[in-house]
Amino acid sequence: MGKTGHCGEGLRIDRRSLLTVSVALLLAGAPTCAQASDFSEYLKSLWPAAQAAGVTRETFESVIAGLTPDPQVVSKPARQAEFTISIPAYVAASVTNGRVSRGRSVLGELAGPLRRGQERSGVPGEIVVAILGVESAYGTGAGGADVLRVLATLAFEGHRRELFEQEFVAALTILQNGQATRTQLRGSWAGAMGMPQFMPSAYLKYAIADDGAGTADIWGSRADAVASIANFLARSGWVAGLPAIVEIRLPDGFDYAQFDLDFAQWRGLGVAAADGAALPAAGAASLYLPAGAAGPAFLITDNFEVIRQYNTSDAYGLSVALLAERIAGRTAPRTPWPAVSPLSTAECKALQQALTARGHYHGTIDGKLGRAARNAVHAFQIAEGIQPADGFAIRAVLARLRAR
């Protein structure tokens, strides 16, 4: 489990090898004897951290005995769809008629657990169901990878080593606590587990049973899965009664000078909801133009940022919010999406570097454009008198930066 312009910003994977094992050899197939030996010795080095977390030696040894690197996971972090394709394309693939229809059925099937979850958390059922739909196809596609093997491999290869070591120990803790069996600990290539696709640490922190007692079964119980998702969002700062996103119409002659105001100020500028409804009475909201001024315009709130705590990609957050709107019976975006050609990772890095040189961007040069980069593009456009100053990172903006 969660910022993009066209490229994503979120899961930053350090691909530098921290040990001597060769990524190329791992990708080629089964590990060699030397690799397996190195991996085994590495796993043994994790015992002090596991012991400090309360894992017994018996549990630890039962897991690492015979464990080998997974050759399929090493290259996958660089290929996450939400970080490599355009936002319109990602939304189109995520918010399909079939997924909307199934989501409406699930909304009815889980009415009781969703009602209880909303009473506890303030999170609307359609948001929870949308996350369940995007994460695991409503519980049917949670992944079959051995979570402990995946996490150990990613840590061994240096993919955010400290993070994945912590997640490996968290998974051992779940096993030690009897919260799941060894065979239940299955999930994605990144170690996300069960219907909500929680990382092990997230399970320990957020997973709850629907009945409020006992162990949360996010692998076999959809009721526990939705209760846990709602709890995650609530504890991440969800504001009850505040929409995550509102599609809007900008008034004629809008100058794009402002990106961050409250709803009263947006109303004062002549901004209106696209469906004719009243804008929320209060709350901060940011103008978001995921395909530039030619595409749909949205106001996103703090609850949009809460969704992004699940997955830091803007494409993900937008897809969840729009899918929830459709599941709840509200309309799809009223403005057509224009064709968008995403910048390459190298172009995104060049854009970040150029914006940094001009004092507009203060983030990481990682080729992943999110809110910070979007605001930096907007600041550059305002400074240069470029209209519309929509914060949209396109090649014309990069060319202008390079020319300066």
Image (cartoon, rainbow, N blue to C red):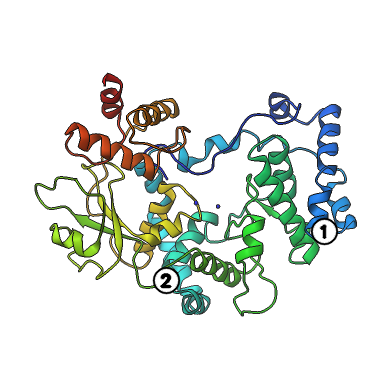
Would residue 298 appear left or right of 127 to someone viewing this image? Answer: left
The image shows a total of numbered marks equal to 2
* Real-space CA distance between mark 2 and mark 1, rounded to the nearest whole angstrom: 37 Å
Vertical arrangement, residue 315 with respect to residue 27, above or below: below
Please say whether residue 339 is visible from this viewpoint. no
Q: Residue at x 59, y 60 (%)?
A: 195
Say what amino acid the circle numbered 2 marks. Pro
Vertical arrangement, residue 81 with respect to residue 284, above or below: above
Residue that extends furthest to the top in the rendered view of this protein: 403
Q: Disc 2 vs disc 1: which is toward the camera?
A: 1
Q: Bin the neighbour count of mark 1 within 10 Å (Cα to Cα): few under 14, some 14-19, many 20 and up.
A: many
The reply to whether callout 2 and callout 1 are in contact (CB within 8 Å) is no
Q: Residue at x 62, y 71 (%)?
A: 208
Say what amino acid the circle numbered 1 marks. Val
Image quarter of residue 298 = bottom left
Would residue 375 appear left or right of 79 to someone viewing this image? Answer: left
Sequence-wise, which precedes: disc 2 or disc 1? 1
Please say whether residue 45 is visible from this viewpoint. yes
Which residue is label 2 attached to?
124
Image quarter of residue 122 = bottom left
- Along the line of sight, which residue is nearer the eye, 111 or 64? 64
Secondary structure of the residue carrying tag 1 is: loop
Q: Residue 26: which disc?
A: none
Q: Residue at x 32, y 42 (%)?
A: 375
Q: Bin the neighbour count of mark 2 within 10 Å (Cα to Cα): few under 14, some 14-19, many 20 and up.
A: many
Q: Position of residue 300 (x, y in %)?
A: 32, 56
Which residue is label 1 attached to?
55
Q: Position of residue 371 (x, y in %)?
A: 37, 45
Give the quarter of the figure containing the C terminus. Answer: top left
